[in-house]
């Protein structure tokens, strides 16, 4: 049975305008795609520029340990992808996509600017058998050494392969050895500036919820449901995302290294303001797209904006709870971590587990048999999408720390890049290969040989596994300093980028094609919710790869390399296995999709 709108329910959006895809004016696509492409490019400039810095900022400026830093990073990125579920709904029902995008852009820009105020670098200290000692840092050339100050003695810190820690005297010999678990390190940081950090992350999380699902929804409005150019259009749009990422992940870390953390975050904020200006002052180019649904009664926009700001203190409290839980769960492993899930974890998993069956039940009553089966296929793909991003999204956490600690960052011996800048490989390869993939999908579609969406998802999962396998293989050739040549890391990002192009732009297009029209914004939000859960679990995986640090520096690079490669190999095996399973499931899934390609 199909629901009929009443006076109390929103009317269907007006889609009576001529299909804009029929007017080929921008690479064979509607001219509005150019404006949305550029808007998203600058928004992603801000987001990925900030993301390239965040884990390093947490470990090097605030001196959080690996477990706390990667847990906070995972929680932040999880909220970034959770809020679109609400933002998509509010845009569908009240605001319209365009106004939601504008509000989100302003809130994110304020959040990035707030990150510029981080205060002084935290002061490291060590706790040995319950007693606290000052830690000093000395730098000679590119080498930094950490010392424990014990009265008049200055003892260098050296981690051992068995987990114990040796304190070396001036002659380089151990003056004292602390058993595994008897040595811990932390930083004395300003509670006020930690509060500023968490408020900034909260503002970005809320703002992203209004921006992220609705800019993609506006792209979907440019095409008829069965227009064969839709996948290519989303792939071009996805290239804009990565063009912004490419620029920001090079320049934001560069400014952070040469000028200061504040400069890197400030550049990200500037990019976000450009994105807002492009949508605010569109010169009428987007008229008729992303408009509010026609409803009776007063406009609720101002009330929604005011209510959205309440999310900032709520998210702040979630971050505080997450950090406390991360410290409490230290050393408990994955099983123990899930048993003692913090409030944010419970919120994410409960929302996802309720949303998927809830939307399917609604689809059963609101749609016909074919629509329900299409929605069921979408839910299966969304579930596998969660697995993909869980494994893929080590880029901003464990892979960035691996780059910082166990990677030779020299480029042909000519110059050295920073660990944050290694994330530019992913964006570079996306920009290089997105047009190729767009042409490939179009030509294969014309020939009737384009892989189905489930097969593309399966290829993506196998690809993410192969990328980690290549890096583990390359680790066998690490030098005596336990550092891997940067080209092995670049190889991982090359394979991951090709895998990403098989799932992310295709996934966005899939949602707009398989969803029942009345809830396409909500389904776009659910798509990002699946990525939110993945980001949170990715933080758990990164915590498993945690290693002992003092003042942001690893105490034993061999232990660090072995830890990372062990985790990465497990990821490779899981990804390849699940990719094969999904390819086998592609046959029944194609039937449920009723011709959607």
Image (cartoon, rainbow, N blue to C red):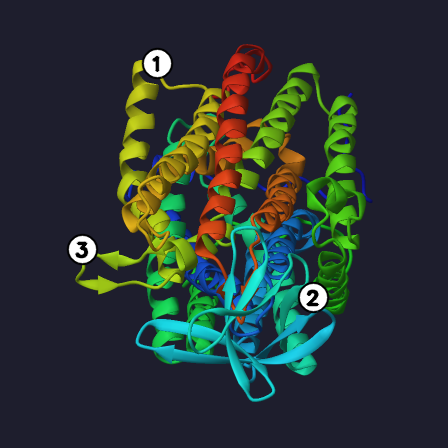
Residue 31: in sight, yes or no?
A: no
* Relative vertical location of residue 589 with respect to residue 6 in this rendering, above or below: above
| Crowd around label 2: few <14 · some 14–19 · many ≥20 (10 Å) | some
Could you tell me residue 493's position as x and y percent? 36, 43
Residue designated by label 2? 305
Check contact, mark 1 vs mark 3: CB within 8 A. no
Q: Earlier in the sequence, mark 1 or mark 3?
A: 3
Residue neighbourhood size for the residue with mark 3, other residues' Cα within 10 Å, grouped as few (<14), some (14–19), many (≥20): few
Which is closer to the viewer, label 1 or label 3? Answer: 3
Image point (50%, 65%), residue name: 158
Residue 514 percent coordinates (x, y) = 58, 27
Residue 448 — which label? 1
Residue at horizontal 65 percent and vertical 75 percent from the top: 194
Q: Measure the alpha-carbon separation of dots 3 and 2.
A: 51 Å
Residue 87, position in %: x, y? 66, 53
Residue 412, disc: 3
Mark nearer the viewer, 3 or 2: 3
Dot placed on the residue nearer the N-terminal end, 2 or 1:
2
């Amino acid at each position: 049975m199909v629901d009929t709108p009443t006076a109390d329910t929103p009317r269907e959006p007006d889609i009576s305008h001529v299909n804009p895809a029929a007017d080929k004016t921008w690479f064979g696509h509607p001219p509005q795609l150019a404006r949305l492409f550029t808007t998203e490019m600058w928004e992603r400039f801000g987001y990925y520029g900030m993301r390239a810095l965040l884990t390093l900022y947490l470990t090097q400026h605030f001196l959080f340990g690996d477990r706390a830093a990667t847990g906070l990073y995972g929680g932040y990125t999880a909220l970034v992808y959770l809020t679109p579920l609400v933002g998509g709904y509010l845009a569908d029902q009240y605001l319209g996509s365009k106004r939601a995008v504008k509000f989100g852009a302003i809130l994110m820009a304020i959040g990035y600017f707030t990150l510029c105020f981080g205060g002084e670098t935290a002061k490291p200290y060590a706790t040995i058998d319950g007693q606290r000692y000052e830690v000093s840092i000395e730098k000679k050339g590119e080498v930094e050494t950490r010392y424990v100050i014990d009265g008049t003695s200055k003892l260098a810190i050296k981690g051992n392969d068995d987990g114990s820690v040796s304190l070396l005297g001036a002659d380089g010999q151990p003056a004292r050895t602390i058993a595994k678990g008897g040595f811990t390190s932390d930083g004395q940081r300003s509670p006020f500036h930690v509060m500023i950090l968490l408020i900034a992350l909260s503002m970005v999380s809320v703002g992203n919820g209004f921006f992220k699902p609705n800019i993609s929804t506006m792209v979907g409005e440019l095409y008829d449901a069965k227009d064969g150019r839709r996948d290519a259009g989303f792939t071009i749009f996805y290239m804009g995302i990565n063009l912004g990422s490419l620029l920001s992940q090079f320049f934001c870390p560069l400014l952070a290294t040469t000028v200061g953390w504040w400069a890197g975050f400030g550049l990200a904020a500037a990019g976000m303001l450009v994105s807002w200006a492009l949508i605010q002052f569109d010169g009428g180019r987007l008229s008729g797209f992303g408009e509010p649904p026609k409803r009776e009664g007063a406009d609720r926009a101002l009330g929604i904006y005011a209510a959205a700001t309440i999310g900032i203190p709520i998210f702040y409290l979630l971050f505080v709870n997450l950090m406390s839980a991360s410290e409490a769960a230290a050393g408990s492993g994955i099983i123990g971590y899930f048993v003692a899930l913090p409030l944010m974890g419970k919120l994410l998993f409960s929302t996802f587990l309720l949303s998927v069956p809830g939307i399917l039940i609604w689809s059963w009553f609101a749609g016909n048999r074919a629509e329900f089966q299409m929605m069921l296929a979408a839910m299966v793909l969304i579930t596998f999408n969660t697995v993909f991003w869980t494994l893929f999204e080590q880029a901003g956490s464990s892979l960035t720390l691996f780059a910082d600690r166990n990677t030779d960052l020299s480029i042909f011996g000519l110059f050295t890049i920073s660990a944050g800048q290694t994330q530019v490989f992913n964006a570079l390869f996306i920009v290089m290969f997105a047009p190729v993939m767009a042409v490939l999908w179009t030509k294969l579609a014309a020939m009737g040989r384009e892989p189905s969406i489930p097969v593309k998802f399966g290829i993506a999962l196998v690809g993410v596994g192969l990328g980690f396998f290549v890096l583990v293989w390359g680790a066998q050739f690490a030098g005596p300093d336990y550092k891997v040549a940067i080209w092995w890391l670049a190889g991982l990002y090359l394979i991951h980028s090709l895998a990403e192009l098989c799932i992310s732009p295709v996934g966005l297009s899939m949602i707009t094609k398989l969803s029942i029209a009345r809830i396409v914004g909500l389904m776009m939000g659910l798509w990002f919710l699946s990525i939110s859960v993945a980001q949170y679990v990715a933080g758990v995986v990164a915590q498993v790869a945690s290693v002992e640090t003092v003042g942001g520096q690893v105490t034993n690079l061999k232990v660090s390399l072995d830890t990372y490669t062990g985790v990465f190999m497990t990821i490779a095996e899981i990804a390849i296995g699940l990719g094969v399973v999904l390819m086998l499931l592609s046959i029944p899934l194609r039937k449920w999709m009723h011709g959607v390609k």
